[in-house]
Image: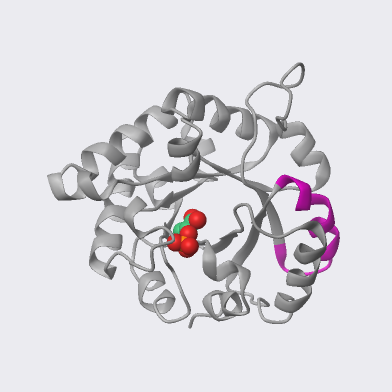
Amino acid sequence: MARRKIIAGNWKMNMTPSQAVALCDTLKDLVVTDEADVVYCVPAIDIIPVVEAVKGTNVEVGAENLYFEDKGAYTGEISAEMLVDAGVKYVIIGHSERRDYFKECDCLLNKKVKQALKAGLIPILCCGESLEQREMGVTMDWIRLQIKSDLTGVTADQVKGMVIAYEPIWAIGTGKTATTEQAQEVCKGIRDCIAEIYDTDTAQAVRIQYGGSVNAGNAAELFAQPDIDGGLVGGASLKADFGKIVNYK
Ligand code: PEP
């Protein structure tokens, strides 16, 4: 069974609510496609205006983070239930910026993945190695550890509906893309890891994105790889170029 591509923008900490609505307007006609799921993962404050702005289009909305508790005294945090009620369908979990700057560990991320799934959100679970790890030859060991830890206690059926984003840290926001061969090799390694933990059906169903300086010029070659089911796009998702990435063929 062919997996449907999924191309998601990660807006990070960019776009005020009014800028967000204007960007949705600019991209509206450019991101129309029948061939892929298109998602804007936006800052929390932009969620409600963006959900409104993309109503009636093919675009779905994602959050960039959530907290793992249901509700309560967690000042500044946002629950899965709040996201669902606001119209969010996807949530990025474990982006390297959150792992690095906010010290989010795999134990915390595992709780977040389970909480998202419990609420009916689709996690976009990020993993990826640093340049040092790549140079030491431990890329796949590291990523397997991340995947295994972050998916502890998650069922095969849940994993089938999830998205995993392979994002080499050295390629994020640097303009330095992994080669097509490097990206395919690791995405296949992640699929093999899922087959080992679960089974072949689960491995064939889960969608695996590549992320790291994806742009209009390299998307077609990356997304044509057998184990790359689309992309998680940072910088280029804030420009009209995102339309070219979505319609990469
Ligand atoms: C990202 O933020 O997930 C990302 C891949 O960023 P960029 O496309 O800018 O490298």
Which segment did they paint magenta?
44-59
**Extreme residue toward the top, this view:** 73
**Coordinates of residue 15 in the picture (x, y in percent):** 71, 60
**Extreme residue toward the left, this view:** 136
Is residue 2 in view from this perspective? no
Magenta stretch, overall SS: helix
Instruction: State how the image is colored.
Output: one colour
Q: Which residue is rendered at x = 54% and y = 24% of the image?
A: 111
Q: Which residue is rendered at x = 28% and y = 46% of the image?
A: 192
**Coordinates of residue 118 in the picture (x, y in percent):** 65, 29
Q: Nearer the viewer, residue 202 or 17?
A: 17
**Coordinates of residue 86 in the picture (x, y in percent):** 82, 44
Q: Is residue 6 above or below residue 205?
A: below
Q: Nearer the viewer, residue 84 or 93?
A: 93
Q: Which residue is rendered at x = 55% and y = 81% of the image?
A: 244
In the rendered image, the quadrant that contains the N terminus is bottom left
Q: Which residue is rendered at x = 71% and y = 55% of the image?
A: 61
Is 103 within the magenta? no
Taking 202 as reference, is 233 left or right?
right
**Coordinates of residue 46 in the picture (x, y in percent):** 77, 53
Q: Quadrant of residue 66?
A: top right
Q: Nearer the viewer, residue 47 or 132?
A: 132
Q: Is residue 114 above or below residue 60?
A: above
